[in-house]
Amino acid sequence: MGDQIYAILRKRILTGEVPPGAIIDERAIAAEFEVSRTPVREAVKKLTDENLVEVKAQSRTLVKPINRKLIHEAFLIRRALEVENVSHAAERATKADIQRLEDVVMLHKLALQRRHFVEAIKLDDDFHRQIAEISDLPRLWKAIEVSKAHLDRCRYLTVPQPGFGDATLVQHHNIIKALARNDEAQSRRMMGDHLDKAYRGIVSFLDVMESELRANPSMVQEKGVDD
């Protein structure tokens, strides 16, 4: 049960449903899921290990602010793993694999058009997860999924912004084209280009947000962004 509670709380934090600075009330969570506090503590421990929450004085547990250093670290780890992942996938990709990737992109586009942004990010992740399945490296995707948590907090903020989702679709199509040719070098380049552009978009978004915070310091707690 601890793993299930962890997954639910993690998603709430990543999507912003539970915002930076919010208190994680273990008793309330235990009541919500009708469990003892033990599995809730297990879930909170995992979230603490991922730097998503922190325990303050008097045993208060708070959701941590968005932190640039952690975002950059997450980007470096994800980029290294994803480029290696797509390299292996390029050697193995079949026509059926390419069709499945194209289907995901089609659904991703539809979710963006309908402004279903949580679903759009899920489909974005499905695209990358399926590449890991093609490469036959499922543990690699698990490592990517854990490491990218701090990037994901920003993705839920940036995907509604004009142009962000459309740019991702174009970049995914470029990756598919390279995989369809079983071109390892081009697949690596397209994946690296995709992740680099996504990261630069996040950094630009944070720059604008922090500029707004400097102009209006009262927004700091609401936005929950750390240097």
Image (spheres, rainbow, N blue to C red):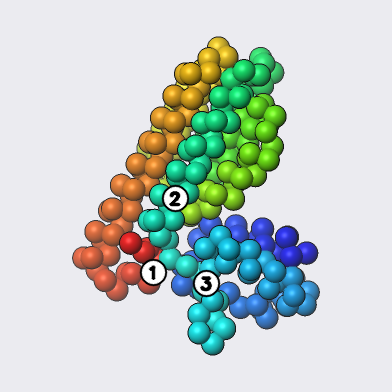
Would residue 221 appear left or right of 116 to someone viewing this image?
left
10 Å crowding of disc 1: few (<14), some (14-19), many (20+):
few
Would residue 186 appear left or right of 40 to someone viewing this image?
left
**Which residue in the protein does label 2 denote?**
73
Type of amino acid at the residue the image marks with label 2: Glu
10 Å crowding of disc 2: few (<14), some (14-19), many (20+):
some
Type of amino acid at the residue the image marks with label 1: Glu
Residue drawn 21% across and 65% down?
A: 215
Q: CA distance from mark 2 to mark 3?
A: 18 Å
**Which residue in the protein does label 3 denote?**
54
Residue 92: where, in percent of width, then height? 66, 19
Hey, which quadrant is residue 165 in on the image?
top left
Residue 39 showing in the rendered view: yes
Task: Give residue 222's mark.
Answer: 1
Q: Nearer the viewer, mark 1 or mark 3?
A: 3
Q: Nearer the viewer, mark 2 or mark 1?
A: 2
